[in-house]
Image (cartoon, rainbow, N blue to C red):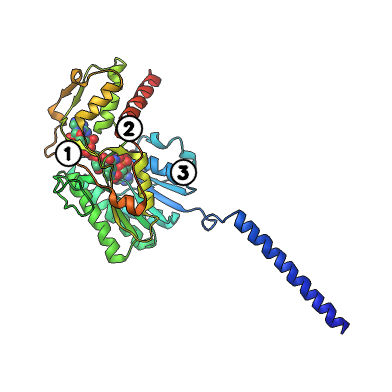
Amino acid sequence: MRASLAGDEWHQRQHSTVRTLLCVYLFVRLTHPIKENFVKKRALITGITGQDGSYLAELLLSKGYEVIGMVRRTSTINFERIKHIQDRLTLVTGDLLDEVSLINLLREHRPQELYNLAAQSFVQTSWAQPVFTGETTALGVTRVLDAVRIVDPSIRFYQASSSEMFGKVQAVPQIESTPFYPRSPYGVAKLYGHWITVNYRESYQLFACSGILFNHESPRRGLEFVTRKIAHGVARIKLGLDSELRLGTLDAQRDWGFAGDYVEAMWLMLQQAQPDDYVVATGETHAVREFCELAFGHVGLDYREYVVMDERFMRPAEVDLLIGDPAKARAQLGWQPKTPFPDLVRSMVDADLKLLKEQQ
Ligand code: NAP
Ligand code: F7E
């Protein structure tokens, strides 16, 4: 009898200890929610040394990701855009032209998300180097997708598609279902990249998304693109380093947004329940002339006194007008652009003034 009472007491104590431990555990869980599986998410970015790659890397780091950046071998290091975060990145060598390098990278680093931003991205160069543009910007996408299929089909894949695919536009504004009519070897290559992404999604059930992004700019934009060329040119003229700015057509119209806003849409696409394709744009369009007017006006100058039309910057086939409707991205991703056009122009001119003054 006594032995049985002692046994009951022992069991009660055990229960009470278990209850206490359970309460402590629940308290800790409620006050300190577990961060996504305790394990850092890992993302691979191709094209991390480019404009978008640098902004996307910043965004993913801020979200706690481990970021692997693929860089191609060059004779001179070109980490200018990522040097401020370089110690937080894992940089690995690979090339879109070399499928084995892509397979090995995926095998070694096992990312859960892959952002394919690498490309020969300058439209004008695509006429001078159409085959190279096709190899990189078109077939490069198949190489990456195939590497995903072979190594780990559960990897979520983002393809950097482009409004250049709309080219000679068939409808205004452009949405996901607007027919494509590319006007440059670059646009044609991007269209291949878009459809091979859709095809691998449908053939192999990959989580593959194509982001149809309209022009997006920033102080980190390459100097050959028209917005940065104008911003830099304005700063040079203002500082007395140049007396003119030579451009091609001033009539072309583009839907220009801020690159920092657009990388957020890339990330959002890969967080959805289902893979899909999205137009990412501001819904506004402006002529190159307007960009000039605002940029020169910002430093108290009249663009008409400095801009010189130069045949060398005219294209064999032009895309006259682009304007995107980001309604689907807004409704399904909750994404919207945050940077108004005049702010973008002014920030680019200010950044170039600062840069040039520091170099003086
Ligand atoms: P970007 O500044 O020109 O950067 C391109 C990146 O691709 C660079 O890191 C470049 O490396 C890399 N790359 C080129 N060829 C490669 C190869 N064979 N193997 C590996 N890497 C290679 O372009 P971005 O403006 O950031 O644009 C990012 C992506 O979005 C591109 O695919 C572009 O076509 C597309 N896109 C851009 C816009 C836009 O308005 N910015 C709009 C729509 C779509 P290096 O530094 O070594 O040259
Ligand atoms: O040209 C005109 C030019 O080179 C814009 C890439 O990121 O966005 C970009 O392609 C417009 C064109 O960009 C000059 O003819 C006039 O009409 O800055 P751009 P882009 O060709 O629109 C798309 C979405 C991408 O995907 C591409 O990767 O400006 N323009 N004068 C000039 N353009 C340049 N570059 N230089 C001039 O002197």
Relative image position of residue 185 (x, y in whole percent)? 17, 45
Ligand 2: does it lie within 8 Å of the C-beta at label 1? no
The amino acid at mark 1 is Ala
Along the line of sight, which residue is nearer the eye, 210 or 86? 210
| Mark 1 or 3, closer to the camera | 3
Q: Viewed as shown, does residue 9 lie left or right of 179?
A: right
- Quarter assignment of residue 342: top left
Residue drawn 27% across the image and 18% down it: 237
In the displayed structure, 229 sits above or below 86; it is above
| Mark 2 or 3, closer to the camera | 2
Residue under label 3, please give it: 89
Q: Secondary structure at mark 1?
A: helix
Q: Secondary structure at mark 2?
A: helix
Q: Viewed as shown, does residue 136 lie left or right of 150?
A: left
The amino acid at mark 3 is Leu
Q: Label 1 crowding class (10 Å Cα cut-off): few <14, some 14-19, many 20+?
A: few
**For the C terminus, which image quadrant?**
top left
The amino acid at mark 2 is Leu
Along the line of sight, which residue is nearer the eye, 237 or 110? 237
Determine the quadrant in which ligand 1 lies: top left
Residue under label 1, please give it: 128
Q: CA distance from mark 2 to mark 1?
A: 30 Å
The numbered mark, 2 or 1, whose residue comes first in the sequence reads 1
Residue under label 2, please give it: 344
Q: CA distance from mark 1 to mark 3?
A: 34 Å
Query: How many badges with numbers are in the image?
Result: 3
Q: CA distance from mark 2 to mark 3?
A: 28 Å
Relative image position of residue 293 (x, y in whole percent)? 23, 25
